[in-house]
Image (cartoon, grey):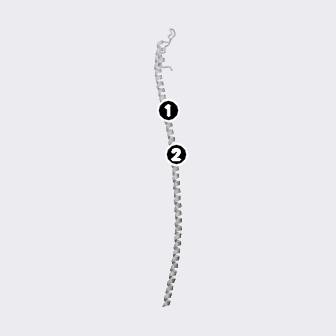
Amino acid sequence: MITPLDIENKKFSKQVMNGYNVEEVDDFLDDLTVDYTKNYKETTELKAKVEELEKSLEHYKTIEDTLQNTLLMAQKTAEDVKNVAKQQADQIINEAKGTAQKQADNLDNEIIAKKKELEDIKKQFDIYKAKMESLLISQLELIKDINKKEDNEF
């Protein structure tokens, strides 16, 4: 690329005949140098700005990638925590059901044992009643016999 200094230092060979007017060429080159210097400076500044913006863009793309990866990891972690919690909840429920079933079975067994005990006590009471009735009947018979004997004696 031609620099403004190259334009400023450019010298043309001078011809004696049919040549260009040296002052006009020099004036034109001076004007061209000023414009070209201005354009060259703007181009350089714009290239620097583009380079800076590209670096910033790359930086933001890196941040975006990092954020996306972080979000994905957070989602996966949340899903894992949710699954573990569900498994633990299911395990607790199953253990509670097992415990409740054991307690219900134990109560059923106790009820059966108490019913059997009650039946045994009822049978014993019936036997006791029968013995008492038998004893009372025999005692009554004895009293009747005694009364008869006393009546016969008088």
In the rendered structure, which amino acid carries the disc numbered 2? Asp
Q: Which residue is mark 2?
A: 80
Give the camera-side residue of 78 and 23: 78
Decide: few, some or many residues near mark 2? Use Cα within 10 Å; few <14, some 14-19, many ≥20: few
Vertical placement of 154 versus 77: above or below? below
In the rendered structure, which amino acid carries the disc numbered 1? Glu
Q: Which residue does the image show at 50% across and 35% down from the upper left?
A: 62
Give the camera-side residue of 44 and 79: 79
Residue 27 position within the rendered picture, expressed as x and y whole percent measured from the top left: 46, 15
Residue 24 position within the rendered picture, expressed as x and y whole percent measured from the top left: 47, 14
Residue 52 position within the rendered picture, expressed as x and y whole percent measured from the top left: 47, 29
Q: Which residue does the image show at 53% across and 50% down from the upper left?
A: 87
Q: Which residue does the image show at 53% across and 67% down from the upper left?
A: 116
Q: Looking at the image, which residue sits at the far top?
A: 16
Q: Which residue is mark 1?
A: 58
Q: CA distance from mark 2 to mark 1?
A: 33 Å
Label disc, if present, on residue 113 of the rendered structure: none
Vertical placement of 109 versus 83: above or below? below
